[in-house]
Amino acid sequence: MNPFPHRKHRQHGFTLIELVMVIVILGILSAVAYERWPVGMEEAAAVKEFKRAVRYAQHKAMTRKYDDTYTDKPWGITVYNNSRYTVQRKGGKCAPPSDESEINNPDKCAEESYRNRALNDKASTTLTGPPPPAPSALFSSVRFNGLGEPPATAGTPLPDTTFTIFTIKADGSGTPVTIHPSTGYVE
């Protein structure tokens, strides 16, 4: 016995035409989204991370007893093998401090997270810097004085036209990270 005789029997579900139309619309939307998907995000993230590391090196230089006579070794960032970098004092050995009394030891470098660091896990990401200080050197670096400026080797200020440029290439054509000589501004 039918409890609702006045209701007509209705079929539940979608017709084949409705299903095909939904599939076609989803296909069009996914094609449009794929075409507009942002590219260069890996490179942008790598650039942001490297800028953060450079600013950290500047912070270390400005807060760790650097003086104008260049007797205290300046902090900076060193790039190895076109892909890895370390924040350390000039000539630092990167040995981790064994206790709180060694934190300001000039032979110690930055925290563990800033030693031999890569920008990301991709082998195709490269980080190149200015030419090494000597033809036989395997690395390039930039150091900062107590004002956060990149000084010349003898501790004198760099000329206003001498910009330090690192280039990061991940999934694009390469993005420069420029350090201004008279202010140390990183862009």
Image: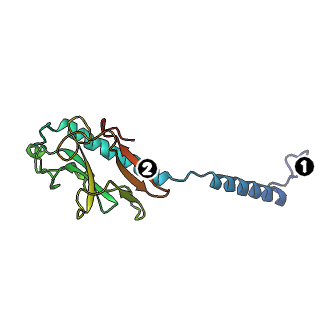
Residue drawn where x is 75% and y is 54% of the image: 25
User: Gap between marks 1 and 2, in whole Å?
Assistant: 61 Å
Callout count:
2
Q: Nearer the viewer, mark 1 or mark 2?
A: 2
User: From the viewer's perspective, is 21 left or right of 185?
Assistant: right
- Residue 113 x, y percent position in the rendering: 27, 51
Q: How is the image coloured?
A: rainbow
The dot on residue 60 is none
Query: Dot 2 surroundings within 10 Å: few (below 14), some, or many (20 or more)?
Result: some
User: From the viewer's perspective, is 112 left or right of 186?
Assistant: left
Query: Dot 1 surroundings within 10 Å: few (below 14), some, or many (20 or more)?
Result: few
Foreground pick, 3 / 119: 119
Residue drawn where x is 23% and y is 42% of the image: 151
Identify the amino acid type marked 1.
Answer: Lys
Residue topped by disc 2: 45
Foreground pick, 82 / 158: 158
- Name the residue at the left extreme: 101
| SS category of the residue bearing label 2 | helix
Foreground pick, 45 / 138: 138
Among the two numbered marks 1 and 2 on one chain, the one whose residue lies closer to the N terminus: 1
Residue topped by disc 1: 8
Identify the amino acid type marked 2.
Answer: Ala
User: From the viewer's perspective, is 75 left or right of 183?
Assistant: left
Does residue 78 appear in this view?
Answer: no
| SS category of the residue bearing label 1 | loop
Does residue 123 appear in this view?
Answer: yes
Foreground pick, 179 / 55: 179
- Residue 157 x, y percent position in the rendering: 23, 39
Instruction: Tell me the quarter of the image containing the C terminus.
Output: top left
Give residue 23's quadrant in the image.
bottom right
Label pair 1/2, CB-CB below 8 angstroms: no
- Residue 107 x, y percent position in the rendering: 12, 51
